[in-house]
């Protein structure tokens, strides 16, 4: 079992990899022996994360791109193919949210979040599947959300886009399972990402109410989500595909 959690320098591309869940997933993969390619829009954030990883002796590359844009994903996949030849896994983690009632939601905000949360997954999967199929035991892990399964107040575009991520994951698992490509989604619940902490600091969330809804009595640390992502990438999860992994401290069981 433990040997299946080890990697030998294979490339894993993580979008939204400079902070939060993406950074935690990239760190867990590096610790297992992968070469993490962290992708995001802000190069300074990526370079800061890379410096932390390299200081620990881990292998990490960075690529600044907006994965909601088709051309940027094309540049990323071309660069990755030239540098590594094959890719062990991609982790589609880039995402954003916005709170509003549907009848008050501007069209441009709907399109912006759909582009970030689901178009990016389409572009990444489409362009990277050829590189993934060159690898031994490849996988895709899509970071969705519990709100893509159960819904949440005043988050119509977030819930719709994350629900699309969940079901696209299942569909891809059907089409590519016979080719050896596993596709799974992770649905985090309340997680102490930098954005989430910002909501708490601004008083936009009541932490006591959040804790009351979670069976374990607290939000997750980013590392707790990142570890599950890394497990699904690894060969230890070699018979897991099409799964929707709820990582929410029991928040959705009642």
Image: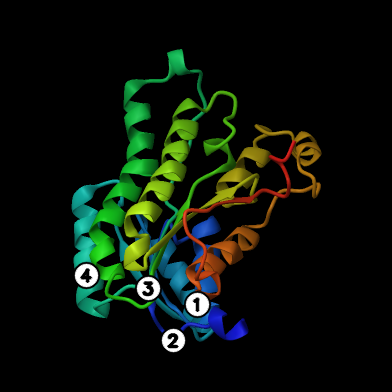
**Is label 4 in contact with label 2 (beta carbons under 8 Å)?**
no
Residue 179 visible here? yes
Q: Nearer the viewer, residue 89 or 98?
A: 89
Q: In this rendering, would 90 be left or right of 52?
A: left
Residue 85 position in % (x across, y down): 24, 78
**Is label 2 in contact with label 3 (beta carbons under 8 Å)?**
no
Q: Earlier in the sequence, mark 3 or mark 4?
A: 4
Q: CA distance from mark 1 to mark 3?
A: 13 Å
**Is residue 102 shown above or below 22?**
above
Residue 138 position in % (x across, y down): 38, 70
Residue 90 position in % (x across, y down): 38, 63
**Is label 2 in contact with label 1 (beta carbons under 8 Å)?**
no
Q: CA distance from mark 4 to mark 1?
A: 20 Å
Q: Nearer the viewer, mark 1 or mark 3?
A: 3
For label 1, the residue is 30
Q: CA distance from mark 3 to mark 4?
A: 15 Å
Q: Residue at x 54, y 81 (%)?
A: 4
For label 3, the residue is 88
Q: Nearer the viewer, mark 3 or mark 4?
A: 3
For label 2, the residue is 8
Q: Earlier in the sequence, mark 1 or mark 3?
A: 1
Q: Residues within 10 Å of mark 2 (few under 14, many from 20)?
A: few
């Amino acid at each position: 079992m433990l040997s299946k959690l080890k990697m030998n320098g294979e490339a894993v591309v993580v979008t939204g990899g400079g902070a939060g869940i993406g950074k935690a997933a990239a760190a867990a993969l590096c610790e297992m022996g992968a070469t993490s390619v962290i992708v995001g829009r802000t190069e300074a954030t990526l370079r800061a994360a890379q410096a932390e990883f390299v200081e620990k002796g881990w292998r990490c590359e960075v690529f600044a791109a907006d994965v909601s844009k088709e051309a940027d994903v094309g540049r990323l996949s071309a660069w990755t193919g030239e540098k590594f030849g094959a890719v062990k896994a991609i982790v589609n983690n880039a995402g954003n949210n916005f709170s509003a009632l549907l009848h008050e939601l501007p069209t441009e905000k709907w399109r912006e979040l759909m582009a970030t949360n689901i178009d990016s997954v389409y572009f990444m999967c489409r362009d990277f599947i050829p590189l993934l199929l060159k690898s031994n035991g490849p996988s895709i892990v899509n970071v969705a959300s519990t709100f893509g399964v159960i819904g949440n107040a005043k988050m119509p575009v977030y819930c719709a886009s994350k629900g699309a991520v969940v079901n696209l994951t299942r569909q891809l698992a059907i089409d590519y399972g016979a080719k050896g490509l596993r596709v799974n989604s992770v649905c985090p619940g309340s997680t102490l990402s930098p954005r989430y902490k910002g909501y708490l600091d601004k008083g936009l969330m009541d932490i006591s109410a959040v804790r009351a809804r979670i069976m374990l009595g607290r939000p997750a640390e980013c590392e707790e989500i990142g570890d599950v992502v890394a497990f699904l990438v690894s060969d230890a999860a070699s018979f897991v595909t099409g799964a929707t992994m709820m990582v929410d401290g029991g928040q959705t069981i009642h």
